Amino acid sequence: MQWLLKYILKIKPNFEEGQKLHWLYPVYEATETILFSTDEKTKSAPHIRDSIDIKRVMILVVITLIPCYIFGAINVGYQNAIALGIERSLIGNLIFGAITIVPIIAVTFIAGAFWEILFAIVRKHDISEGFLVTCALIPLTMPPSIPLWQLFIATSFGIVIGKEIFGGVGMNIFNPALTARCFIFFSYPSKISGDMVWLVGPDGYSGATALSVPATTKNSDAVTLLENVSQFDYSWLNLASGWIPGSIGETNKFIIFAAALILMAMKLISWRVILGGVSGLFAMAYVGNLIAPYTDNSMLSIPAHYHLVMGSFAFGLTFMATEPVTGSHTDTGRLFYGFFVGVLTVIIRSINPAYPEGVMLAILLMNAFASLIDYFVVKVNVNRRMSRYAQ
Amino acid sequence: MQHYVNIIINSVFIENILLIYFLGMCSFLSISKKVETSIGLGLAVIFVLSITAPANWAINEYLLADGALSWAGLGHINLDFLQFIVFISVIAAMVQLVEMLMDRFSPALYVNLGIFLPLITVNCSILGTSLFLVEREYDLIESTVFGFGSGLGFFLAIVSLATVRKRMRYSNVPPTLRGVGMAMLLTGLISMAFLGFSGISL
């Protein structure tokens, strides 16, 4: 690699202040720091010596997403084989899935890189690796049948409105990947509303998703309804192991649970958000079960452990809600923030007939209220300490 | 009881007067710069709304609506063309009351809110609430609850925007977008998140 380093250092003067190519400096800087570690030093306090920096954090998150991609590709192929009624080997499924999702990934990264580099050049900030995580997350939240032009527009919206106009990575209020998903959700609802399954299959082949089965039938028990579905296997174990149609990355809950444990052990995501989220989900699902006999809404009878593996709650909580920037910044606040994400998810799923799934909107809503939670946590703490020391 | 809880939930979340109907934007955008003042304005709006909603309901029911004057033997007179002007006058009187109370008990907040306190008078969300309760044919208690709920929705929206803008101090917004431009974009994003409740029917 010596020749590459030599070459990069040789062309460096072209990008310095006052040179013709100076406007491309962010591109040069990004290439250099991605390929080699930087010799840059912090200029102002605090100076912290640690082996972990933002770049490593981001890359570790992307690495934990890779199993989701591989399983997603296999599952896309598997669902397609079922829809066509043919037998296909694991490798065949993987290849078919890869052919489907590689263009989706490519379009996301092209759109993301385009806007990131454009803003970096115009606004003269460094190209941040944050867009890699955002762009790695967006395809996983999309159905495999998404038209690529819609994906391009959604990614542009997510990156520009969700992140760049706030000044880039670390300064945004709403999760950019979810902003992109939300934009496409409200702009092109026929493709992505979530009441019909998403898969790559022959025209006209469709079916109800696990969440819309109990939503459309009144006065019954949700578990029985799910077991009676003949088209797909909606048992608990199969919902958890992910051999169901869905968005590319969210179906296999075991991979996601493992990723969550790894990320929590490395302290890259806050266990408080996860704990709060899961307990919020269980608490609200339990309340729903209690009032289910008095209503005709079958969604309320879904048990909590089903809620945990249905839809994309696990994926959203692990990779979206735990984002350190857009969530609450105080420890106590994180518990409340996660708790309300769980509660709101069940509320939107159960009592809102307009949307079968509620994780995305619950997290975005809590993004809007995260700073409010922080404000009150800090306020309460200030008041407590004042009353302790004021006498 | 459940009916009144539903009205409150409906007016706070599902049909939030600011984020879904976009009424009362001017004070929403300009007072949300500081959290303390936004809490003050939010409380003032809750107070004004909880008083004006039943007051306007009573005036409409017994003076203005078609056939409302029948208690005086004048059932053939229909005064509902006076709705706007009478509602506004009632609101103005109530705001005057709030202003005097605030000047007496919280002078700091009074100075902070400045011109925006008297401007609650022409705040669209207050008049909007009064007109909504006529349109939806609420009774006295429903109107009071609805007024309180709308105020609570206003409070929640303005305080959350204020805290978000407080966090935005660390952001590096393009110079041309700073201030109101960014507040408009944030409002749009927050109301996009609020769409999660739309469609719930209670």
Image (cartoon, rainbow, N blue to C red):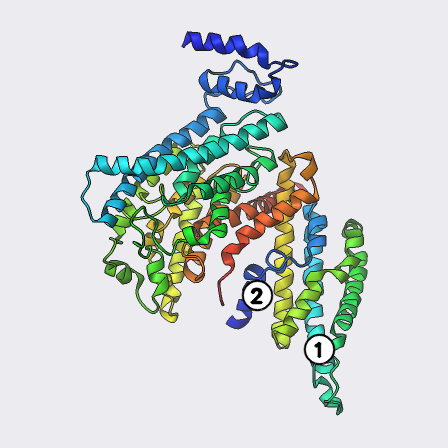
| Mark 2 vs 1: CB contact within 8 A | no
Identify residue for label 1: B60
Query: Against A11, is A368 above or below?
Result: below
Q: Horizontal and vertical percent for residue B91?
A: 76, 67
Q: Horizontal and vertical percent for residue A243?
A: 27, 46
Going 25% across and 38% down the picture, which residue do you hit?
Answer: A93
In terms of secondary structure, where does tag 2 sit?
A: helix
Q: Quadrant of residue A348?
A: bottom left
Compute the Cα span from label 2 to label 1. Answer: 22 Å
Q: Amino acid at mark 1?
A: Asn
Quadrant location, the N terminus of chain A:
top left
Q: Amino acid at mark 2?
A: Ile
**Chain ID of residue with mark 2:** B
Q: Horizontal and vertical percent for residue B149?
A: 61, 64
Q: Nearer the viewer, residue A223 or B137?
A: B137
Identify residue for label 2: B8
